[in-house]
Amino acid sequence: MSKKLLLITGILLSTSLWADINSYINGEFNGWQGYEKTVVELQNGQVWVQNQAHISSSISIGSPVRIYIKNGMYYMQIRNEPMDVIVRRIK
């Protein structure tokens, strides 16, 4: 990831704050289980927890994942899941 910096009104920010994260689930995904009940470990070492009340039932292994920012919140998009879910990084 690039180390470009952006100066906005005297505050130095890394442009990587706005970049999408693309990775794969490390292991099995058994659907969204509800607020703070689903923990997703990615192959890049990051760990995210569900931060929204949503339940789905699906099973996949090693699915591609995209994490992006929308309206100041992180959303996780998992291939073949019908809905992107708000998440929070815990590692």
Image (spheres, grey):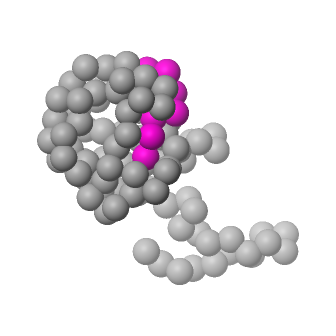
The residue lying at 16 percent from left, 35 percent from top is 60
> What segment is highlighted magenta in the picture?
48-54
The residue lying at 53 percent from left, 67 percent from top is 16
User: Which residue is nearer to you in this view: 88 or 37?
Assistant: 37
Describe residue 17's horizontal placement relative to residue 47 as left or right: right
Describe residue 49's horizontal placement relative to residue 24 as left or right: right
Q: Is residue 79 magenta?
A: no
Q: Disc count in the image?
A: 0
The residue lying at 68 percent from left, 71 percent from top is 13
Looking at the image, which residue sits at the far right?
9
The residue lying at 31 percent from left, 53 percent from top is 42
Could you tell me residue 52's position as x and y percent?
51, 27
In the rendered view, would you say 3 is above or below 23?
below
User: Which residue is nearer to you in this view: 11 or 58?
Assistant: 58
Residue 85 visible in image: no
Could you tell me residue 3's position as x and y percent?
53, 80
Residue 63 in which image quadrant: top left
In the rendered view, would you say 28 is above or below 83?
below
Could you tell me residue 9's position as x and y percent?
84, 69
In the rendered view, would you say 57 is above or below 23?
above
Residue 36 visible in image: yes
Could you tell me residue 78's position as x and y percent?
30, 39
Describe residue 19's horizontal placement relative to residue 32 as left or right: right
